[in-house]
Image (cartoon, rainbow, N blue to C red):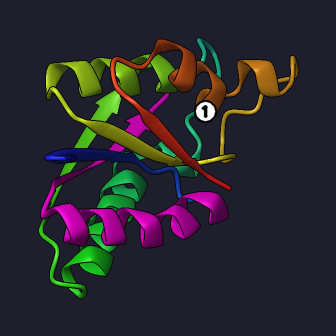
């Protein structure tokens, strides 16, 4: 059913919680697992934050791969730059994934509220089903 699963991560508690579901799906369906971290470029004139540094992203992806490796799951890691929801959907389309699994909240809630959250935008733009883990 699910040959490939895309798991966007951001280091949030919700993202870590979703990893359990992702591992279960990857094992159950013997699915290809792709971990994605999207770095949103800093706005002009602002300083990059620690979470947007190449080192922090590499550390986050490596840590996630290790978590899955301990469970016998080989996971590919991809880092991209751009607006998170759009980039997640672009990668899903580009890699022809069958499912996106993501936490219900994480970084990306905007002042406009949940309607413009990364999760909500991903659901609305995705080329495949999206499983949202609360």
**Measured along the vertical axis of the image, is residue 19 above or below residue 12?**
below
Q: Position of residue 113 (x, y in %)?
A: 86, 24
**Measured along the vertical axis of the image, is residue 99 above or below residue 25?**
above
Q: Is residue 109 visible?
A: yes
Name the secondary structure under disc 1. Answer: helix
Q: Position of residue 17 (x, y in %)?
A: 57, 69
Q: Is residue 128 left or right of residue 122?
A: left
Q: Position of residue 85 (x, y in %)?
A: 50, 23
Q: Which residues make up the magenta segment? A: 13-42
Q: Is residue 40 magenta?
A: yes
Query: Toward the viewer: 50 or 122?
Result: 122
Residue in the image at 21% along x and 72% along y: 27
Q: Which residue is mark 1?
A: 119
Within 10 Å of disc 1 (Cα), the crowding (few <14, some 14-19, many 20+) is: many
Q: Is residue 71 magenta?
A: no
Q: Is residue 48 left or right of residue 128?
A: right
Query: Toward the viewer: 9 or 49?
Result: 9
Residue 48 found in image quarter? top right
Q: Is residue 41 visible?
A: no
Q: Position of residue 60 (x, y in %)?
A: 39, 62
Q: How many marks?
A: 1
Query: Toward the viewer: 36 or 114?
Result: 114
Residue 134 found in image quarter? bottom right
Residue 98 found in image quarter? top left
Residue in the image at 55% along x and 51% along y: 50
Which residue is the extreme one toward the bottom? 70
Query: Toward the viewer: 109 or 114?
Result: 114
Residue in the image at 32% along x and 79% along y: 67
């Amino acid at each position: 059913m699910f040959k490939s699963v895309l798991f966007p991560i951001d280091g949030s508690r919700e993202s870590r919680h979703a990893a359990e579901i992702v591992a279960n799906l990857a094992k159950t369906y013997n699915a290809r697992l792709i971990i994605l971290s999207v770095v949103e470029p800093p706005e002009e004139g602002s300083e990059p934050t620690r979470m947007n540094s190449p080192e922090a992203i590499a550390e986050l992806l490596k840590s996630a791969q290790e978590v899955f490796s301990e469970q016998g799951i080989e996971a590919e890691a991809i880092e991209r730059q751009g607006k998170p929801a759009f980039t997640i959907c672009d990668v899903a389309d580009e890699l022809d994934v069958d499912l996106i699994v993501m936490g219900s909240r994480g970084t990306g809630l905007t002042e406009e509220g949940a309607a413009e959250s990364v999760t909500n935008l991903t659901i609305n733009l995705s080329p495949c089903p999206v499983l949202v883990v609360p």
